[in-house]
Amino acid sequence: MRKLTVSAFLASAVLFLAYCTPKAGKTVAATPVETKEQIVARYPPDQLEKGHTLFTGNCAKCHKLKDPGSRTPAEWDKVLQRMIPKAKLSPDDGALVRAYLIANSKQG
């Protein structure tokens, strides 16, 4: 009986962890890393500003914000694949945060 209880507990724990583990956002994971120039050409200033607002309003809830110029576009893309799902951003909002950070990133 004890083995059955332990097995049931372990199975429940594994299922819980699998369910709660954030998955990479489909939008971010499927989007090739664009250059700063491509982002600036594609997103008008008001959308980049909305990305900034989303970045500061959502990301600062859990940790200190990094300077956008501290990473290259590829580095930001890698971080955002993990963080957008954790922040529970919609695909559109995630894309705006990504655009803001890449537009203000350091050269790769």
Image (cartoon, rainbow, N blue to C red):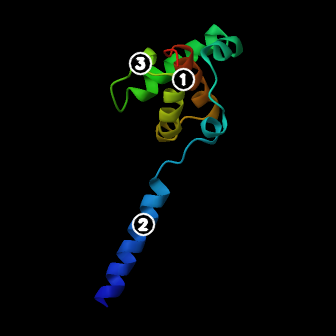
Of circles 2 and 3, which is in front?
A: 3
The residue shown at (41%, 18%) is 70
Q: Which mark is residue 70?
A: 3
Label 1: state its secondary structure.
helix
* Image quarter of residue 98: top right
Which amino acid type corresponds to the residue marked 2 in the rendered image?
A: Val
The residue sitting at 47% across, 36% down in the picture is 83
N-terminal of the two: label 2 or label 3? 2
Q: Nearer the viewer, residue 12 or 107?
A: 107
In the rendered structure, the answer to whether residue 36 lies left or right of residue 62 reads right
- The x, y position of residue 105, in whole percent, is 50, 16
Question: Disc 3 on helix, strand or loop?
Answer: helix
Q: Position of residue 20 (x, y in %)?
A: 46, 54
Q: Residues within 10 Å of mark 2 (few under 14, many from 20)?
A: few
Q: CA separation, marks 1 and 2?
A: 34 Å
Pick whichever of labels 1 and 2 is earlier in the sequence: 2
Direction from residue 42 to residue 98 in the image, left or right = left
Would you name the residue on which mark 1 appears? 73
Q: Position of residue 34 (x, y in %)?
A: 64, 23
Left or right of 61: which side holds 87? right
Q: CA distance from mark 2 to mark 3?
A: 36 Å
The answer to whether residue 8 is above or below residue 36 is below
Q: Which mark is residue 33?
A: none
Residue 70 in the figure: left or right of residue 85: left
- Residue linked to disc 2: 14
Residue at the (55%, 34%) spot, across then down:
89
Q: What amino acid is labelled 3 in the image? A: Ser
> Residue 62's image quarter?
top left
User: Relative to residue 66, is residue 78 depicted above or below?
Assistant: below
